[in-house]
Amino acid sequence: HKLICASNRNKVLFDFFNGGVYDKNREFYLTSSPSMDIIISSNLERLVYSLSGAQKTKALFESLSQTGKYGFDKKADGFEAEFATDEEAAASIKDVFEKCGYVMDTHTSVAYTSYKKYASKSGDAHKNVTLSTASPFKFPDSVLAAIDKKYKSMDTYKLLEELSDISGLKIPKPLESIKDMPDNFNRDIEKEEMKKEIENLFCKS
């Protein structure tokens, strides 16, 4: 019924869909959903093009390049937008796990939380499909800390084991092998030493 655009605290798309202005002149935040930490959306140009054509799109994105923003006077029918803070997303991870036993990653939780906020505000009772694009195993510290604070003191591999236990899923093979890998990169060096360090690491005869 609707396509709901979900954002984290970097809510440039939420502001665009709700206010008609794309403005990248804003503070940038590092969040627990790093793939959504954007100021410039690489996909929005396609939607703008489909609504306004090539000439208008070119002018708008030239304005974005020169001034950092542009105004858009066309309504993107069928689209809604919401955003979720880290705290809201963490609460959703815990809530869904306790109710369903399903472990969401941080990005999926932003989408789920955004939908819940949209539905609450709008009263829209249509069923919703939330698209998940990441594995909780990529973010075990954030995911497990949301579920229970007791996990905060555990090291990374122990977190992966705990996540496997509570989710019923196997640790992905590329991550499974981490425990047996040597720690090759464990030194701090000054920038003046970088060339010599790289030669020592990779240019050994």
Image: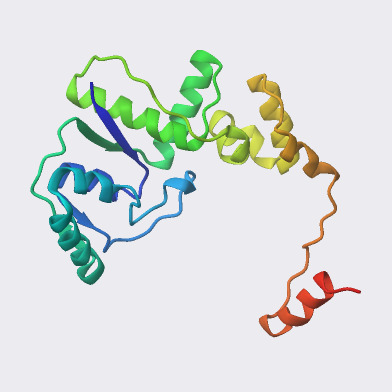
Give the residue drawn at x 49%, y 45%. 32
Quadrant in the rendering for residue 25: bottom left
Quarter of the C terminus within the rendering: bottom right
| Residue 105, x across and y down, in percent | 52, 33
Viewer-nearest residue: 99 or 16: 16
| Residue 107, x across and y down, in percent | 46, 37
Instruction: Tell me: 198 left or right of 23.
Output: right
Looking at the image, the residue that sits furthest to the right is 205
Instruction: Tell me: 15 left or right of 177.
Output: left
Quadrant in the rendering for residue 130: top left
Give the residue drawn at x 43%, y 41%. 86
Instruction: Tell me: 8 left or right of 20.
Output: right
Viewer-nearest residue: 131 or 53: 53
Give the residue drawn at x 64%, y 40%. 152
Instruction: Tell me: 138 left or right of 57.
Output: right
Give the residue drawn at x 14%, y 58%. 55
| Residue 99, x across and y down, in percent | 49, 14
Looking at the image, the residue that sits furthest to the front is 54
| Residue 134, x across and y down, in percent | 53, 35
Viewer-nearest residue: 192 or 55: 55
